[in-house]
Amino acid sequence: MSISVGFIGIGAMGLPMTAMLAKNGVPVTVWDANASQSARAAILTGVTVAGNIKQLVATTDVIFTCLPNDQIVESVYLNAGGIVEMLSEGKVTVDCSTVSSKVTQSVAAVALKKGAHHMDASMLGSVPQAESGEIGFVVGGDAAALEQIQPLLDLLGRFTKHAGPAGSANRIKMIHQTLVAANAVAVAEAMSLCEASDTDLDCFYDVVCNGGGFAYSRYFEKRMPRMREGDFSPLFMLDLMAKDSKLAQDLARDVGMNAPLLDQVVARLQDGQAKGLGAEDFSAVARLYQADKSV
């Protein structure tokens, strides 16, 4: 492929995404604030490690970022020596981070002054989807720029939906995460109630997955077996789900909406963080109910 790609943020999602691009013949230049993260990508054929962000941006056409939060995204894009400082006409930046739409819009406005386009490409899925090339992308930004990056998204994912102007995808993702987080808490409570009332968990699982009722969810089907085995190894960390849910809570407050269920879900996730569960999978919210029973 003739498009050269820069990738900043070689973490749990960034590494398999870089590997997928390189596997498909896309030349990729990477950079991460943690040099050991970049080194993990450097062993891949077709991947080059940049000395700094300036070098990465200068030598690539499309720059992907996959970063933890608003503050780091703002720093990597807008600080001295950051991405925007080096942008030139025709380049496209694609931020796969889950951040507030305000941050995306501020970056997009500055990028546009340099003749570049900034896209928010919010991801649906976690590490297994990144490894298999089955991420779902919700994209905000210029429609023509989306056409330019679509071949890359097709390599990385199975679904792309244009949400509208820059920042639109962030809002879709935040609201999407309210459903995911609420489901996680509800499944944890249901499983705990089964255990506390000596209800057959195998029967319950089969009824929910195969009975045709509305209780079924993909989360329930995939996570319940792991939860029963006590496997909370992170596919998507509780810290990240708490962050995403808090962004959605902030959005609700910005528009003056009362969201009592979301408030309770955020509080429960923050309880998990306070108990030291932040680095575990977000399904580890179930551990809070085990703790409650032990009191």
Image (cartoon, grey):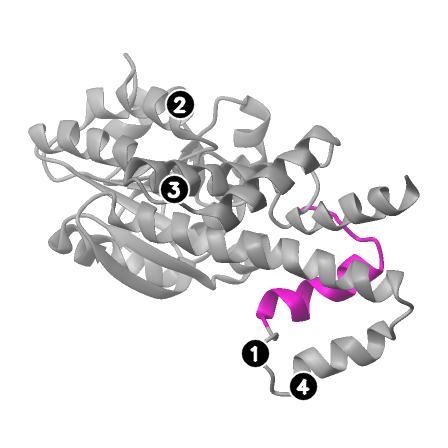
Q: Is residue 237 left or right of residue 33?
A: right
Separation of disc 4 and disc 2 at Cα?
A: 44 Å
Magenta part of the protein: which range? 217-234
Secondary structure type for disc 3: strand
**N-terminal of the two: label 2 or label 3?**
3
Mark closest to the chain's N terminus, 4 or 3: 3
Disc ID at residue 28: 3
Which residue is depicted at the point 11% across and 33% down?
112
Kind of residue sitting beneath label 1: Phe
From the viewer's perspective, is 175 left or right of 207? left
Task: Classify 10 Å Cα crowding around label 2: few (below 14), some (14-19), many (20 and above).
Answer: few
Residue 97 seen by the camera: no
- Residues at discs 4 and 2 in contact (Cβ within 8 Å): no
Q: Which residue is mark 1?
A: 214
Amino acid tagged 2: Gln
Is 233 within the magenta? yes
Q: Which mark is residue 71?
A: 2
The CA span between labels 1 and 4 is: 11 Å
In the rendered image of this protein, does residue 245 appear above or below residue 33? below
